[in-house]
Amino acid sequence: EVQLVQSGAEVKKPGESLKISCKGSGYNFATYWLGWVRQMPGKGLEWMGIIFPGDSDTRYSPSFQGQVTISADKSINTAYLQWSSLKASDTAMYYCARLPSKLFMGAFHFWGQGTMVTVSS
Amino acid sequence: EIVLTQSPGTLSLSPGERATLSCRASQSVSSRNLAWYQQKPGQAPRLLIYGASNRATGIPDRFSGSGYGTDFTLTVSRLEPEDFAVYYCQQYGSSPRTFGQGTKVEIK
């Protein structure tokens, strides 16, 4: 069974750094694209970017390029989303989600449970 | 970037009624690369439909998708109590991938 388990909720101050994680199990982690989706409070879904853990090929939405960094460690089946300097506007729920094949194509068939990030002074 | 516009914003219906949700793209979505997701409060989204008309694993057949090009539709033939939720379309035919803003299906 495919499972994506995300790290727990975070409360941070503006300017702080943060790295949240998504651990995959039940499949060959290195060979499936894994993406990140933002949902601000009361708002819709936003596609942030995606990584192929096998070779760390990463694609970003222009809206998020330079704002976050997506990485992965295939040795421990874990992908990451990180910020170097958080802003209050980064307050949101963040989901990781997996594509159905090793191609950069397809809908997100599998989702993590989400990580709530709150940035407040 | 392809912009997806969903309508209506909110749909007020009773259990047993038919729901028809629209997703219109600002430019053609290649190869019917469009998906629909359902999201309930406090839950992660769940894939319903991919490839415009293919039901995902475990999705009941009261959910159906149709359309091509720039106009797509999600239909719920008879609403069950558990179907009241927010629905999002997403295109994955071009980069960046994008989502629609969502349609809320609420109990009338």
Image (spheres, coloured by chain):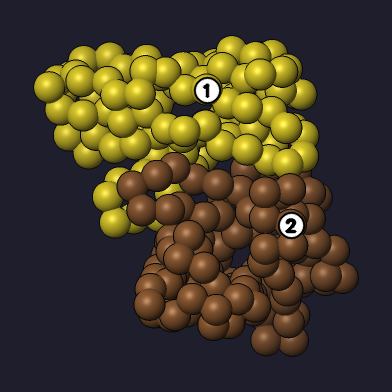
- Residue at left offset 35%, top offset 23%: B9
Left or right of B66 on screen, residue A92 = left
- Residue at left offset 33%, top offset 47%: A42
Quadrant containing the C terminus of chain B is: top left
Question: Residue B100, how many percent across, how many down?
Answer: 52, 32
The lab-note entry on whether marks 2 and 1 share a chain reads no
- Residue at left offset 79%, top offset 49%: A104
- Residue at left offset 75%, top offset 80%: A74
Identify the chain drawn in brown. Answer: A
Chain letter for mark 1:
B
Position above or below: A82 against B51: below
Query: In the rendered structure, which amino acid carries the disc numbered 2?
Result: Gln
Identify the chain drawn in yellow. Answer: B
Cα gap from disc 2 to disc 1, whole angstroms: 23 Å
Kindly identify which residue carries mark 2: A65
Tell me, yes or no, if residue A118 can be seen here. Answer: yes
Left or right of B83 on screen, residue A41 = right
Position above or below: B19 against A118: above
Residue B5 tag number: 1
